[in-house]
Structure formats: C-alpha cells, structure tokens
Amino acid sequence: MRKLHVDLGKNSYDIIFERGLLKDVGKYIKRDGKKLCVLTDDNVAKLYADDVVSSLSKAGYIVSLCVLPHGEKTKSFDILPKIYSKLLEEKITRKDALVALGGGVIGDLCGFVAATYLRGIGFVQIPTSLLAQVDSSIGGKVAVDLPEGKNLVGAFYQPETVLIDVDALGTLTDAFFTDGMAEVIKYGCIKDAELFDKLEKCAGKQGLVPVLDEVIYRCCDIKREVVEKDEKDKGDRMLLNFGHTYGHALEKYYKFEKLSHGNAVAIGMYEVCRRAEARGLTQKGTAERIAAVCAMYGLPSEDDAPVKEVVKGVVNDKKNMGDKLVAVLLDRIGESYLYPTTAEFFD
C-alpha cells in the first residue's frame, strides 16, 4: 500500500493506492455514520458493485446501491431528483455518506450530490477509470453540466478519502484507457518533463503498463501539490486546465456525443500550443511533440470542426474571467504559465 496526504487543513484527506482494494474497501473506510449509499453506473456495477457492497456490509455498514446510466449525459440536472429521492428513501442522514464508484462522470456527480444533499454529507471516491484515478477524483471539484457547457454548476467539496485500485484498469476498454492518457500527458506537459520523456520512451500502452503504478502515483502527487497551493482554482490550480478550454468547447460543439473528454483535451493541448508557438509564446516544436506522444497512445491532435464555431463555446467556459480568458500555455514541456487573453486567441 502507498499513500499520499492532501493537506487542506480541516478538509485534508488521504489518497490510498493498493492493488485489489476493491474487494476489501470496508477496511479503508472508517466513519461513525452507519449508512453508505454507493453511486455507480450500469457498466461499473456489473464489474464491481457486488464486491464493494459485500465488503462494506461485512465492515458493519448498512449499504444501498444507486445505479445510473453510463455516459456524460448522466452528469446533468435532470438526474438529480432521482438521486435525492433515493437518498431520502434510504433515510440517508448528515452522519452518513456517499461512495462514488466509477469514472469521472460518477465522481463529479456524486460529489455534487454530497455537497448539496442536506447542505452537505461525506463522500468517498473510488475511481475505476484512468482519467478519474489520475485527475478528477482528487481536488474536490464537483459539478454537473448544463446545455450551455460542461461543469458550469458545481462546488469545491473535498472527499473524505480517495481509494485507488490500479487493477480496476484491467477491465477498461482500449478507448477508455486512451481517454485517460490525455490527462496523464497533460501532467507531463505542465509540470514534469521527466514524466513526459517517460511517456515518449514507453511509446504506447504496452510499454507503459510495467510502470503504470508509478505513473499514476506521480500524476496524483502533482495534483496534490497544486491543489494544496490553490484549493479554489484562482491561481496555480488553473494550470491543470491545460487543453481544457478549447477541449470543453469542442465537446459542447458536438453536444457531448462525438468526442470523449480525453480526445477533446488532446486536441485542445495541440491547438493551444500551435497558436502559442505562432505568437512566440511557446518553444518551437512543442506542439508537434505533444501531437506525436498523443498519437502513440491513440489520441488525436486535430479535428475538422470549424474553429470559429467551436470558439463560441469558449466564452461560456468557467475559466473565462469576465471578458478575459486565462489561457494555460507552455513555455516548454514541463513548464506552464497563465496567459490573460480573450477568446480571439483561438481564432
């Protein structure tokens, strides 16, 4: 077992890494409340719900299960009444907690429900996708989408603990593994040139698997460090949005149907670097290095969508500060900075 401590004062918590922990999660969740509601999706439920519910029950908890449809469209306001009704039906109180079992959609949604139900109850993150393990399960950003854009209604609400079982990634399809690699590449781009070099040398999933535990731990450690410095996303934490401004707008352009989050972010990283290089703001050749490493892991770097139409979605992005947009740029691989601009940067 390995552990990282996220030091946020009264909101502090541990990230625990152990292969096989999904079958023994009851050992890692210690709390006074006796009821737990496990929130998951129909895909993940088939794989892990029985083990998780059984382990928690053996640990003495009264456990209920709420299974939702998989996919980004579940992360919406429309689904909230169903979840709140389930919690009321199960008589979940402020002493009790939710357990997010799944990928980024379930984690974000579960955290938002925890932040708002009875004005706030506890929740535990058990991420089962690569994207969720290295990124979305850590840091307390919880949200739901609106038709106008992603994550526009949410809160900063930290989990009580994050439990990471790398074995869970063995059941991911190649598409879901690839999707998560966009966030892994992002960390190398913004904070760790050595990590980026390692991804280049591994040259794809087959080469990465032997060092996957180490890579996931490093990504989590980078995020821990950034979140500790800037919990509320007003400074350095914004660097974690590299590739996301254009990526989110691209997802919205396709109505969250054609492109996955990771694919959109990969395109966003390349697009922002390409434009920054043209303005002399990023070291020449950076965009092509990013495109090359994305290709190694099955990610795209370009899309046929008309840029002017996509950019209309940038103005509603949550990283837009009034009439200004704070773009995340790279000086070079491993070194990032915030650049105040406008949506015209992407024209």
Image (spheres, grey):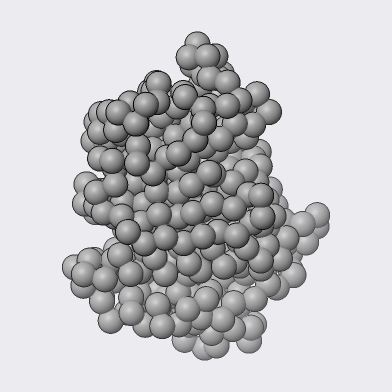
Q: Is residue 101 above or below residue 6?
A: above
| Viewport quadrant of the C terminus | bottom right
Q: Nearer the viewer, residue 243 or 10?
A: 10
| Viewport quadrant of the N terminus | bottom left
Residue lying at the far right in this picture: please name it.
322
**Residue 245 makes an appearance in the image:** yes
Q: Is residue 255 above or below residue 326?
A: above
Rendering coords of residue 36 (x, y %): 45, 27
Q: Nearer the viewer, residue 201 or 161?
A: 161
Q: Is residue 320 above or below residue 279?
A: above
Instruction: Report the label total.
Output: 0
Residue shown at the point (50%, 11%) measured from the top left: 89
The quarter holding residue 45 reads top left
Residue shown at the point (36%, 62%) measured from the top left: 2
Residue shown at the point (54%, 63%) measured from the top left: 224
The quarter holding residue 263 reads bottom left
Rendering coords of residue 209 (x, y %): 22, 66
Q: Nearer the viewer, residue 254 or 93?
A: 93
Residue lying at the far top in this picture: please name it.
89
Rendering coords of residue 19 (x, y %): 26, 54
**Residue 260 makes an appearance in the image:** no
Image position of 307 (left or right of 219): right
Rendering coords of residue 91 (x, y %): 52, 14
Residue shown at the point (74%, 68%) measured from the top left: 341
Residue lying at the far left in this picture: please name it.
206
